[in-house]
Amino acid sequence: MELKPGQKYRCLACGQIVIPNEDGSCPICGAPFEMLVPVDDDGNDINE
């Protein structure tokens, strides 16, 4: 999975819906990109 600009993700570590930092990490808890799941505008997981 690659970082998509503007895509929202749910962090599996802290549970927040976020737009990742430039390095792909969670801006809330700092979890790595591997811990982020893409979500749609309603917060539902997007299966890729």
Image (cartoon, rainbow, N blue to C red):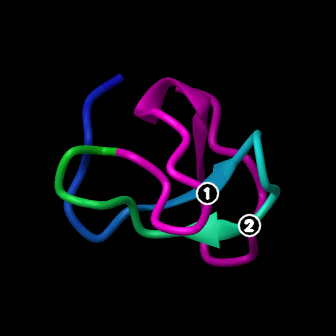
Residue at 78 percent of width and 58 percent of height: 44
Residue 6 appears left or right of 32: left
Q: Is residue 10 above or below residue 48?
A: below
- In the picture, measured across the screen, residue 42 lies left or right of residue 35, that is right
Residue 48, horizontal then vertical, whole percent: 52, 25
Q: Secondary structure at mark 1?
A: loop
Query: For the residue carrying disc 1, how many other residues have a C-alpha within 10 Å: few (<14), some (14-19), or many (20+)?
Result: few
Q: Earlier in the sequence, mark 2 or mark 1?
A: 2
The amino acid type found where label 2 is placed reads Gln
Residue 39 position within the rendered picture, expressed as x and y whole percent measured from the top left: 62, 56
- Mark on residue 16? 2
Magenta stretch holds residue 41 = yes
Q: Is 9 placed left or right of 16 in the picture?
A: left
Q: Is residue 24 above or below residue 20?
A: above
**Label 2 secondary element:** loop
Q: Give me the residue at 76% from left, 42% from top.
A: 13
Direction bottom: furthest residue: 41
Task: Please tell me in which quadrant of the rendered image residue 41 appears.
Answer: bottom right
Over which residues does the magenta segment extend? 25-48
The quadrant of the rendering that contains the N terminus is: top left
The answer to whether 22 is drawn above or below residue 23 in the figure is below
Q: Which mark is residue 29?
A: 1
State the residue at coordinates (74%, 76%): 42
Q: Position of residue 20 (x, y in %)?
A: 38, 59
